[in-house]
Image: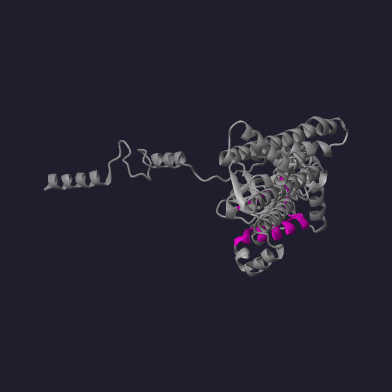
Amino acid sequence: MIHTLSDRLVQLLTEIGLTGALALTVERLILISLVAVVAFLANWVARQLIVRVIHSFFRRTKVTWDDRIADRGVLLRLSRIAPALVIYGTAGIIAPEVPLVGETIRRLSALWIITAAGMTVSAAIDVFHDLYQEQEYSRRRPIKALIQLGKIFVFAVVAIIGITTLLDQSPLVILSGLGAMSAVLLLIFRDAILGFVSGIQLSANNMIQIGDWIEMPKYDADGDVIDITLQTIKVQNWDKTITTIPIYALTSDSFRNWRGMTESGGRRIKRAINIDMRSVRFVTDEMRTRYCRFSRIRPYIDQRQAEIDEYNREHNIDPTDLVSGRRMTNLGVFRAYVQAYLAGHPLVRQDMTMLVRHLAPGPEGIPIEVYFFSADQRWAYYEGIQADVFDHLLAVIPEFDLRVYQQPSGTELQNIAEALHTPGNPISGNPIPGNPTPQTRDETQENVKRDKT
């Protein structure tokens, strides 16, 4: 058919006055233009059929997987094969007297078809990933690294088949050459191989997920995981900067994952208040009477005092003996108050660890550590709960005849210095008005001796 059309074109061109090489050249240009128009029409028809018929049908169905196929353009990428098939079938008319030209066009057309097929498979893999991410367990088991590895494999196969098609060689020739270059390939794809192995370990052990809050000081990372790829993990820090970490670093180095805190339903608060040790004393009757005004610890004080009285009575200890018997201290009462206050707080998890304990005394007093879990894990609310609790505790400490240790500030030191240099202060060395200084007394005695002489 092609040869018949070519002969008729040559005959028609000869009739209108074109002869020889000019007629052949015009005939070839007309045929090439005709092939291009047919290829364009084939592509247009295929796209219109896919968009107007197949995609419209997909939109009307109740399932979602076909919508993903339309969104990712899987069939549209497949439609690019149509013009390549037209060019492949008509390659012989370009230069029939030179078979090499037609063969080259066929090989290029085959490469086009292979590439379009590879892109179609890649889009289909994206569709599978989209459907997987719609599942609830996808956050616990991200497979983006495996998806990327699958795409690399697809394009590697496309590259091998494409090269062998262009060179008209068997794929085994390329594969045997790759075997000899394995050391070079391992060096080039080192990060990809390490990332693939690390990604499998992270996924199998459920070590990290999208949305996890992780800390990795070595890489200045402190924030939420927003992306996991074959080679890297992206962390959005709290200052909104992005830190990129090699994925194999998560298996070779240590990092902290706060997911356990999120899943537990509570967030730990651990802070100490330094108490001035000189303010710790035994509770007197007057102090006990004042403390009983606090409803939170009234039952504790009554029960504790009863136990103390019974113990001292059984051991014949004089109540006035403050050393031998058992006594309550204002610091112990304060600790009991903190425990009762936390037990009644609506934003403190009562089913998690809660304690008030002494830490080792030091130059800055005796630390009383408060350890509990807030019921709200959100950062702003968590900080608000923590601030409210310690605002209250700092305000009630004087009610228990205790003092918070605080190093003197610059203003306090300045006031002390000014007080030491105040006239009339015997430590300052400044003269008291009306009293002679030592130097003045010596001069007076010398004057008296001179007058007597």
Please say which color scheme the image uses: one colour
Between 20 and 402, the one lying in front of the other is 20
On screen, residue 40 above or below 307: above
Q: Quadrant of residue 423?
A: top left
Q: Residue 226 location in percent, x, y?
A: 67, 44
Instruction: Report whether residue 385 is seen.
Output: no
Q: Position of residue 361 (x, y in %)?
A: 61, 55
Q: Look at the image and give the residue range highlighted in magenta.
A: 188-216
Residue ranking furthest to the right = 62
Residue 207 colored in magenta in the image: yes
Of residues 287 and 435, which is closer to you in this image? 287
Residue visible at 20% across and 44% down in the picture: 444
In the image, what residue occupies the spot 59% across and 47% down? 243
Q: Judge from the rendering whether residue 393 lies leftward or rightward of residue 142; answer left or right.
A: left
Image quadrant where one finds the N terminus: top right
Residue 387 among those drawn in magenta: no
Q: x, y (%) of residue 269?
A: 69, 45
Residue 417 falls left or right of residue 176: left
Q: Quadrant of residue 58?
A: top right
Q: Nearer the viewer, residue 269 or 15?
A: 15
Residue 129 image offset from top left, x and y in percent? 77, 46
